[in-house]
Image (cartoon, helix red, strand yellow):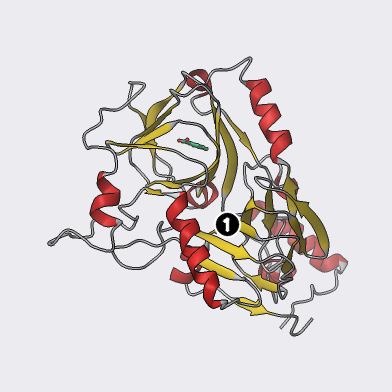
Amino acid sequence: MTHERPTETAERAAFYEAIEPEGLTALWSVLGDIVTPEPKSPCVPFLWRFETVRSRLLEASEFISAKEAVRRVLILENPGLRGQSKVTTSLFAGVQLVMPGEVAPSHRHTQSALRFVLEAEGGHTTVGGERTEMAVGDFVITPNWEWHDHGNTSDAPIFWLDGLDIPLVQFLDASFAENLGEDEQPVGRPEGDSLARYGANMLPVGYEKRTPTSPIFNYPWERSREALEQMRRTEEWDPCHGLRMRYVNPVDGGWAMPTIAAFLQLLPGGFATTPYRSTDATVYVPVEGSGRSVVGGETFEWKPLDVFVVPSWCAVHHEPDEDAVLFSYSDRPVQEKLGLWRERRGNEHE
Ligand code: 1HN
């Protein structure tokens, strides 16, 4: 079903103009734009080089502190969505830098955040009273409305990718935010507490689920990477995804976050994936290896820590030159909850 706009006549044009100040619009004049036979997104495929983002952040660190900026982040803004602070229509992406000795002061907001650590020799975040050191490849969650502050007591800068559901929360007009008024929140539990309680394939007896977000807030790199390495021995390669794992909430097996899905996948060198499309626009971060991905017919050559975005319903396939590991995130949990998520494998109906 496609909707063609009825031909414009002088009578119709006059009618549209007459009803405009009355707060009215004729559905038949816009139907084709609002109900499309398949997704038509203003979001476009794009790749950001880590080298460029990294050096721009270091440049910014010479004129603004993490404290003054609140968060020293460069927004990865989709070229099709300029001025909107969006990487896709529903999600935010940015790269954050905390220099040695700096703190990013404690605040909380109704937006949920994920961090994927890109470069670090130290650095920490405290979330809801528990502190965690951040190492390269760690997947760290800040659930909505939890106090969070970051610091870096190492000698080297720390860079991570911030993925937030800012556009979703904005769309729903549900943004609330507060500053704690202190740089750092009090730490109430020992480091590693939540991983011990919830990350050992066990749960404390009597544990009751209170939030839709995973109680684990740091999924350490070694464990995730090791899972892929073990799995590869059975060579159950998916034609579209290689070996793709999703980060889960251990309490219910669902997504680790209510609004954002996160994945880690292994693609063996020389394995060209089959084209794939899905309605959840996806942000990818190659972590190991190099290669290229063809996104909507456009080729993006990537190296570790570059970031690229695949819009909704845009076909993507990957061509790793060597073994490659990709981290990715999307709004899939939201689409699934609403019964909207779809995928298509291969080139059917092209
Ligand atoms: C935020 O609070 C953080 O806490 C990072 O590190 C990025 C982007 C927009 C709004 C809030 C953080 C953010 C953010």
Location of the N terminus by quadrant is bottom right
Q: Position of residue 103 (x, y in %)?
A: 44, 22
Q: Which residue is mark 1?
A: 328
Name which residue lies at 57% across and 70% down. Answer: 243
Q: Is residue 199 left or right of residue 298?
A: left
Tell me where residue 118 sits by quadrant: top right
Q: Residues within 10 Å of mark 1 (few under 14, many from 20)?
A: many
Q: Is residue 254 left or right of residue 78?
A: left
Q: Position of residue 159 (x, y in %)?
A: 56, 34
Please tell me which residue lies in front, 133 or 258. Answer: 133
Asked if 224 appears above or below 78 in the picture, the reply is below
Asked if 174 appears above or below 126 in the picture, the reply is below
Please tell me which residue lies in front, 118 or 107. Answer: 118
Please tell me which residue lies in front, 148 or 327. Answer: 327
Q: Is residue 163 left or right of residue 179?
A: right
Q: Farthest residue in the left direction?
A: 206
Tell me where residue 317 sits by quadrant: bottom right
Location of the C terminus by quadrant is bottom right
Q: Farthest residue in the front direction?
A: 233
Q: Position of residue 301 (x, y in %)?
A: 79, 53
SS category of the residue bearing label 1: strand
